Amino acid sequence: MRIFELAITAAAADIDELGHVNNAVWVRWIQDMATGHWQAVAPPAHREAYVWVVTRHEIDYLRAVLPGETVTGRTWVGEAPKGARFDRHVEFVGADGKPRVRARTTWAILDKATGRPLRVPPEVAAPFR
């Protein structure tokens, strides 16, 4: 299992009327983690041939993140792909090491040329396992 990490600092635009990071921002950050991992690990030929789309998000909001606070996002793919689908785990932790958000998201791979889903090729999955 290969873990991808990214530090993210909550900007003023990320904060809702309750004074913490808005739920919609967490979804964006989860997507940023997934796409950042793909860009960092997948070879250019794979990035040119395939695109991923979200089919499901399951998110547990554990602790608030306040303006200016930095979290470290970690993402990894734990299980082997199932057909066109790949489950991804994401966790955001604060400077104190305590988790703020945990998520499990399901992504489906599409062939860019046809726009159709396909089974995740073993050579596409390999760099993430």
Image (cartoon, grey):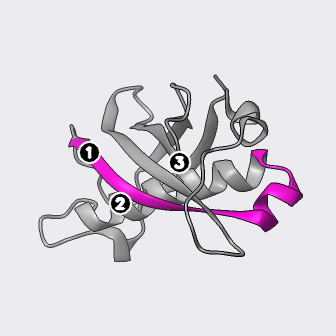
Amino acid residing under circle 3: Ala
Question: Which structural element holds mark 2?
Answer: helix
Q: Depth check: give the residue in front, 7 or 52.
A: 52
Q: Magenta segment range?
A: 41-60
Q: Is residue 89 magenta?
A: no
Q: What is the number of the mark on residue 27?
A: 2
Amino acid residing under circle 2: Val
The span from disc 2 to disc 3 (Cα, nearest Å) is 22 Å
Answer with mark 2 or mark 1, whichever residue precedes in sequence: 2
The span from disc 3 to disc 1 (Cα, nearest Å) is 22 Å
Task: State the image quarter where residue 125 is shown.
Answer: top right
Residue 28: give x, y in percent of width and height: 42, 64
Indicate the quadrant containing the C terminus: top left, top right, bottom left or bottom right.
top right
User: Image point 34% across, 57% down: which residue?
Assistant: 26
Residue 103: give x, y in percent of width and height: 34, 41
The span from disc 2 to disc 1 (Cα, nearest Å) is 9 Å
Amino acid residing under circle 1: Ile
Answer with mark 3 or mark 1, whichever residue precedes in sequence: 1
Asked if the residue at tag 1 contacts the one at tag 3, i.e. Cβ–Cβ closer than 8 Å, the answer is: no
Residue 12: give x, y in percent of width and height: 36, 73
Crowd rating for badge 3 (residues with CA inside 10 Å; few <14, some 14–19, many 20+): some
Q: Which residue is mark 1?
A: 59
User: Image point 34% across, 27% down: which residue?
Assistant: 98
Residue 111: give x, y in percent of width and height: 66, 65
User: Image point 76% across, 34% down: which residue?
Assistant: 127
Q: Which residue is mark 3?
A: 84
Please tell me whether mark 2 or mark 3 is closer to you in this view. Answer: 3
From what the image shows, is residue 121 above or below residue 18?
Answer: above
Asked if the residue at tag 1 contacts the one at tag 2, i.e. Cβ–Cβ closer than 8 Å, the answer is: yes
